[in-house]
Image (cartoon, helix red, strand yellow):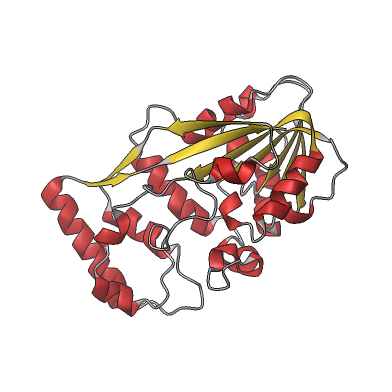
Amino acid sequence: MDSQDPFRDSDYLQKNQYRDSSNLDARAALHRQFSTATADWQPWVFDLLRLEPGMRVLECGCGPGWLWRQNVDRIPAGCQITLTDLSPGMVAEAEAALAGSGHQFSFQPANIQALDFADGTFDVVVANHMLYHVPDLAQGLAAVQRVLKPNGRLIAATNGDEHMKELPLLVPEAVRQKVASWRMRGMAGQLPFRLENGRSLLAPFFAQIEQHLYEDSLWVTDADALVAYAFSMIKPEMEVPETAVAHLRELWAAKIAADGGIHISKQSGVFVATR
C-alpha cells in the first residue's frame, strides 16, 4: 500500500472519511442531482446481480445500504443478504434504514481482507466502488473467492482514468496550495483498482470476467453542490481557509452563470467475475 494514500488507510477510512455517510453523501448528491444518465446507478447495478429467490448475498463496503434501499421492492423472495462494512457507523446506518424491510438482512462490521464466513457460503458478493480502498487487494480478492460458491459471482464497481477528468482543471493552483495535501479524487492519480486494470487484477481469482460500462456525465448547475463534493475529500484535522472555499464558490458560480452549467465527464462501470 502507498503509505501516503489515506484512501487506502483502513484506520483513516473507518474513523474519519467513512465514519458515517456524511462525506459519501456529499459526493453521491452531486451525482444524483446532476447526472445525465437515462438509468439511475443503483438500479443499474442491481440488475447485474441477477438475483434469484433464495440466493445468499454478501456486500462488502455496503455504506449506508443505498443499493438495497433503492431496490428493496425488487429483491426476490427468500434471499439472505449480509451487509458488511469496515465502518461500524456505516453498518448501523444501513441496519436502521432497512429495519422492517421484510427481507432477510443481517449486518456486521467486517474487513474484506479477513472475511469470517465459511468457504462456499455466497452466490453473489458485491463490492460497489470499494476495491480501490483495499490495502492488500490480492488478499481481499482471495477472501472473496473463498466465500463464493462454485460458479458464484463477484459484482465489482469502479471508475476509469477519465472519470471526472475536468475537476482538477476547475481548481486554481493558488487554491490547491492553500489546502495542503488535498485529496480530491481525480487529482490523486490512478485508482489502484479501475476499469483499465480491473480485468487483469481479477483474472488470477476468477474464471470468467465481463465488463459493463455505465453511460453518464454531469451537468452541474449549483456551485454549492460542487464545493461540497470537493471539500468532502479533505481530512477533518486540516484547517481549510474560508478564503479558499469562497474563492472556489465564486469562481464556479461565475462559470455556471456564464455557460449555464459545468460539464464533467464520468467513466464508471462494473466487472462481473465468475468463480
Q: Closest to the observer: 115 or 54?
A: 115
Is residue 92 at all visible to an observer of this figure? no
User: Residue 36, located in which quarter of the rendered image?
Assistant: top left
Q: Closest to the observer: 89 or 144?
A: 144
On-image quarter of the C terminus: top right
Instruction: Report the residue at 32% width, 44% height from top.
Output: 265
User: Residue 114, located in which quarter of the rendered image?
Assistant: bottom right
Instruction: Report the residue at 24% width, 68% height from top.
Output: 172
Instruction: Report x, y in % for residue 164.
Output: 35, 50
165 lies above or below 234 = above
Is residue 64 rendered to the left or right of residue 83?
A: left
Q: Closest to the observer: 270 or 174?
A: 270
Instruction: Report the residue at 64% width, 23% height from top.
Output: 50
Instruction: Report x, y in % for residue 37.
Output: 37, 32
Taking the view exactly as shown, the residue that stands out farthest to the right is 118
On-image quarter of the N terminus: bottom right
195 lies above or below 14 = above
Instruction: Report x, y in % for residue 257.
Output: 14, 51
